[in-house]
């Protein structure tokens, strides 16, 4: 399983290929490294790679999966972009893309339950549909008071990212 690490403006794909205790074989983008990695509870990492030693202190920022990395001479802002982070980012961007009168799926998933029918009157905040994605169920609520004009999916169907699910007038 790989993750993406955003270091300032660069995004690198990082994957652990093999691990035996603190000895790791990792792939960063398309290059493979053999490293000896040690860390302590205070977030300080000691990395030996190809005869060189690197010490890095990671300090958690206020946002989840965001860190400041301190080296001997510099500091860097880092974001870990794993499956959960991508899901949250996709969900928030789909919510921003949705017009005031529709529910849009932020990522691929499966329709678990539809709680409304065409013609139903709904209030802002009413749960309209439940989608299962990445072993989690998410309820999508009406962004406005209105009337359901169109339902583009059925229970049990699969949906794509950014697919319009329900339209409200």
Image (cartoon, grey):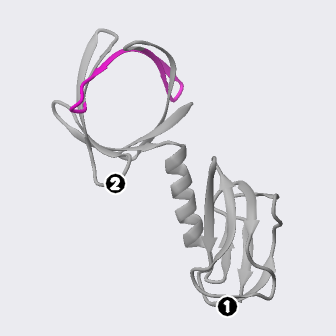
List the residue tagged with mark 2.
Answer: 63
Which residue does the image show at 68% across and 64% down from the upper left?
Answer: 130
Q: Which residues are magenta?
A: 24-43
Q: Secondary structure at mark 1?
A: strand
Q: Nearer the viewer, residue 77 or 87?
A: 87
Q: Residues within 10 Å of mark 2 (few under 14, many from 20)?
A: few
Residue 146 got which mark?
1
> From what the image shows, is residue 118 above or below residue 30?
below
- Residue occupying the point 27% across, 13% down: 52
User: Residue 7 at x, y = what percent?
Assistant: 37, 41
Q: Which residue lies most toward the left here?
A: 73
Residue 62 magenta-drawn?
A: no
Could you say which quadrant of the image residue 111 lies in?
Answer: bottom right
C-alpha span from label 1 to label 2 = 35 Å
User: Which of the 4 image quarters holds residue 48?
Assistant: top left
Q: Position of residue 113 (x, y in %)?
A: 74, 65
| Residue 84 image point, x, y percent | 52, 47
Considering only vertical position in the picture, is 91 above or below 129?
Answer: above
CB-based contact (under 8 Å), mark 1 and mark 2: no
Magenta part, dominant SS: strand
Image quarter hosting the C terminus: bottom right
Q: Residues within 10 Å of mark 1 (few under 14, many from 20)?
A: some
Q: Position of residue 69 (x, y in %)?
A: 26, 38
């Amino acid at each position: 399983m790989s993750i993406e690490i955003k270091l300032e403006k660069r995004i690198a794909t990082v994957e652990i290929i093999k691990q035996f205790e603190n000895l790791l074989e990792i792939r960063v983008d398309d290059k493979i490294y053999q490293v000896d990695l040690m860390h302590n509870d205070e977030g300080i990492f000691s990395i030996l790679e190809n005869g060189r030693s690197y010490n890095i202190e990671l300090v958690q920022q206020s946002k989840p999966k965001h860190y400041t990395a301190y080296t001997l001479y510099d500091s860097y802002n880092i974001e870990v972009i794993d499956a959960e982070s991508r899901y949250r980012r996709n969900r928030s961007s789909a919510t921003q893309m949705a017009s005031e009168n529709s529910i849009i799926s932020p990522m691929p998933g499966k329709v678990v339950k539809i709680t409304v029918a065409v013609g139903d009157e709904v209030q802002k905040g009413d749960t309209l549909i439940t989608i299962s994605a990445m072993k989690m169920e998410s309820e999508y609520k009406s962004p406005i008071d209105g009337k359901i004009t169109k339902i583009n999916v059925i229970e049990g169907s699969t949906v794509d990212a950014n697919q319009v699910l329900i339209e409200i007038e």
